[in-house]
Image (spheres, rainbow, N blue to C red):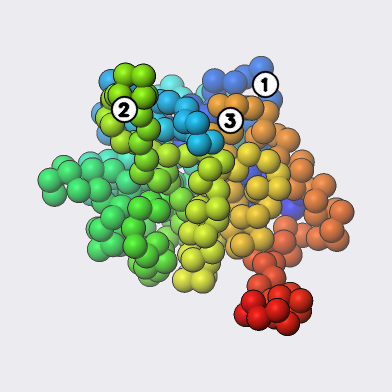
Amino acid sequence: MTELQIRNARFKNPVLTASGTFGYGLECPDLFDVSQLGGVVTKSISRKPRDGNPPQRIAETSSGGMLNSIGLANVGVDVFLDQKLPALLQRKATVIVNIAASSVEEYCYVLERCEEHEGIAGYEINVSCPNVKDGGLSFGTNCPAVANITRELRGRTDRFLSMKLTPNVASIGEFARACEAEGADAVSCVNTFIGMDIDVGTRRPKIATITGGYSGPAILPMALAKVYEVRKAVKIPIIGIGGIMTAEDAIKFLVVGASLVQLGTVLFVDPMAATTIPKGIEEYMQRNGFRHLTDLIGSLDVTMQPSLVAAGWS
């Protein structure tokens, strides 16, 4: 399959692992060679170690999805750089460091620490974090705040920079335009939707924080619509995320206009999907005469079928 390059980052194929669903990329050494993945997006890395939220913090739902409220648990940037990153680079993985923070200063600090180290392909910035200086309001729902973070980080790195956007806003296209205007190389769409579930036996929420991030196959149509909205709003590449379980699911995001995709919840069910889905995409391209991945990206046909037009469905 054709290799993709965005800025200085090279991806062997268009399928990456999503942050928080593949650990630090070191937890599955006997399953497959991580160097063959399109890329490994790390767990969110913060300035200091975080224990995360108390349990229960993950629960499967009967509606075809999963709730999580992990709370950005991670080892902190110092341990990541000293222990996790060298092991990943030794395995020749394409490493995208996901950064989470509770202030603009923390985002900048973590990125600047990472800039001291060779081998990192780029960064994905999790803006769905509480801004402690603004009463806990999520950065990701404040467009000027997202623009400011993008601007500050763009000025501190020449590496690939993608902003991971929340779908829990009225117009995700507006946020994508702000990221593009401030120099982002890509936008990752989308982070989890807000959801909750109840155990009717106890009448208690299934996770301790009551609401959490909802992911899994049930959100695919909504995530696909968000990527479609963003594709119409910006020209920079999009990383499509949300409910991908099969190669066909991934192809849908590529057709709508995503250049790359990320696998999340499916890795809890089938870690091997990280290798089988790229193969499925390649086989689809061969069957349908697509010589290059760029020919498939954005190939959506929105013309109305003649029979529907004749029936008044226009």
User: In this rendering, is residue 170 above or below 118?
Assistant: below
Secondary structure beneath dot 2 equals strand
Q: Residues within 10 Å of mark 3 (few under 14, many from 20)?
A: some
Q: Earlier in the sequence, mark 1 or mark 2?
A: 1
Q: CA distance from mark 1 to mark 3?
A: 12 Å
Residue at the disc numbered 1: 31
Which of the 4 quarters of the picture holds residue 102?
Answer: top left
Q: Amino acid at mark 3?
A: Leu
Query: Residue at horizontal 61%, vertical 55%?
Result: 253
Task: Say whether residue 145 is left or right of residue 311.
Answer: left
The answer to whether residue 153 of the structure is visible from this angle is: no
**Does 208 appear above or below 139?**
above
- Residue 267: mark: 3
Residue 247: x and y in percent read 71, 44
Q: Residues within 10 Å of mark 2 (few under 14, many from 20)?
A: some
Residue 271 place in picture, x, y as percent: 63, 27
Residue 306 in the image, given as x and y percentages of width and height: 76, 79
Please tell me which of labels 3 and 2 falls first in the chain.
2
In the rendered image, residue 115, in percent from the top left (x then y), is placed at 39, 43
**Residue ID at (34%, 62%):** 170
Discs 1, 2 touching: Cβ within 8 Å: no
